[in-house]
Image (cartoon, rainbow, N blue to C red):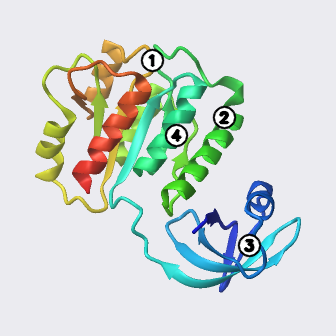
């Protein structure tokens, strides 16, 4: 069944105001009053609903029943992504959303080949839209937050909110994410209600100085395997390993 984002839910009524969603429902899918859909509020709840009114400005729906929330990980995974080229970031946001990541934070690093600059708000809006579409496609109920970019200094402070942060470092030898995760998380924490961070470098990689600062702040340096991965591949592999181990 088709799934849409509800801009407002009040009692047994829901409203959709997004022009893109209204166009998709009425023109692409040619839905009518009385058709049944699924709605999400973006915060973890999903409902079955029936369209009760359609206009150019909004679509009103009657909520039927709350649906089981079985599309979310029990642990919050936060990916700190060294800023790549914008098309790569589009791909990263889409795929990390499908995997179940709950927060994505662009990080300004020394070897970033591109900086976000003055276009940051527009890029964040685009990435948030990509995340919303991926949520609907993958039957998730929570829309991951795409945060404003952070400097390395700000990242060091942000890491304090995590139970543990892993640094995926291409020159790390032998200490794999799977091995270190099982040693440090499985034995020391309950897996429910955890917040785990994972840091991915940009196209140029993470400098030795950046690694030293991150490790000094509590990050654990790990390898993702014997191959040197592209930044977009590393993000997906790292998040997938965590999702598998946590679930």
Which comes sooner in the sequence, label 2 or label 3?
3
Q: Give yes or no for contact between labels 4 and 3 (Cβ–Cβ under 8 Å).
A: no
Q: Is residue 194 left or right of residue 5?
A: left
- Name the residue rendered at 30%, 18% in the picture: 228
Q: Contact, CB < 8 Å: mark 2 with mark 4?
A: no
Residue 123's disc is: 2
Q: Residue at x 68, y 42 (%)?
A: 125
Residue 15 numbered tag: 3
For the residue labelled by badge 3, is the local secondary structure a helix, a strand or a loop? strand
Mark 4 or mark 2, which is nearer the start of the sequence? 4
Relative depth, front residue between 60 and 29: 29
CA distance for labels 2 and 1: 19 Å
Classify residue 154 as left or right of residue 54.
Answer: left
**Residue 100: image location, x then y, percent:** 41, 52
Quick one: SS at disc 1? Answer: loop
Residue 171's disc number: none
Callout 4 environment at 10 Å: few (<14), some (14 to 19), or many (20+)? Answer: many
Q: CA distance from mark 3 to mark 1?
A: 42 Å
Q: Position of residue 41 (x, y in %)?
A: 59, 67
- Residue visible at 89% across and 65% down in the picture: 56
Residue 232 sits above or below residue 36 on the image: above
Specify few, some or many for label 1: CA neighbours under 10 Å numbering under 14, 14-19, or 20 or more.
Answer: some
For mark 2, does the 10 Å Cα neighbourhood hold few (<14), some (14 to 19), or many (20 or more) residues? some
Numbered mark located on residue 93 in the image? 4
Ranked by sequence position, the earlier of labels 4 and 3 is 3
Kindly report which numbered mark, 2 or 4, lies closer to the viewer in this rendering: 4
Q: Which mark is residue 203?
A: 1
Between circles 2 and 3, the one closer to the viewer is 3
């Amino acid at each position: 069944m088709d799934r849409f984002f509800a801009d407002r839910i009040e009692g047994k009524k829901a409203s959709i105001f997004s022009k893109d969603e209204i166009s998709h429902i009425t023109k692409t899918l040619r839905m009518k009053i009385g058709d049944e859909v699924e709605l999400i509020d973006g915060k973890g709840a999903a409902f079955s609903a029936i369209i009760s009114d359609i206009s150019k400005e909004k679509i009103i729906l009657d909520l039927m029943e709350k649906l089981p929330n079985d599309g979310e990980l029990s642990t919050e995974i936060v990916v700190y992504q060294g800023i790549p080229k914008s098309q790569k970031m589009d791909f990263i946001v889409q795929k990390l959303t499908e995997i179940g990541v709950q927060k994505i934070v662009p990080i300004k690093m020394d070897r970033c080949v591109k900086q976000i600059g003055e276009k940051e708000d527009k890029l964040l809006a685009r990435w948030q839209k990509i995340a919303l579409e991926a949520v609907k496609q993958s039957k998730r109920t929570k829309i991951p937050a795409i945060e404003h970019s952070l400097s390395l200094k700000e990242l060091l402070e942000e890491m304090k909110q995590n139970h543990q942060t892993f640094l995926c470092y291409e020159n790390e030898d032998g200490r794999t994410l799977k091995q270190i995760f099982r040693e440090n998380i499985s034995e020391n924490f309950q897996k429910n209600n955890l917040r785990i961070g994972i840091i991915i470098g940009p196209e140029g990689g993470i400098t030795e100085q950046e690694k030293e600062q991150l490790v000094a702040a509590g990050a654990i340096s790990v390898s993702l395997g014997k191959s040197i991965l592209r930044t977009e591949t590393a993000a997906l592999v790292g998040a997938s390993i965590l999702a598998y181990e946590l679930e």
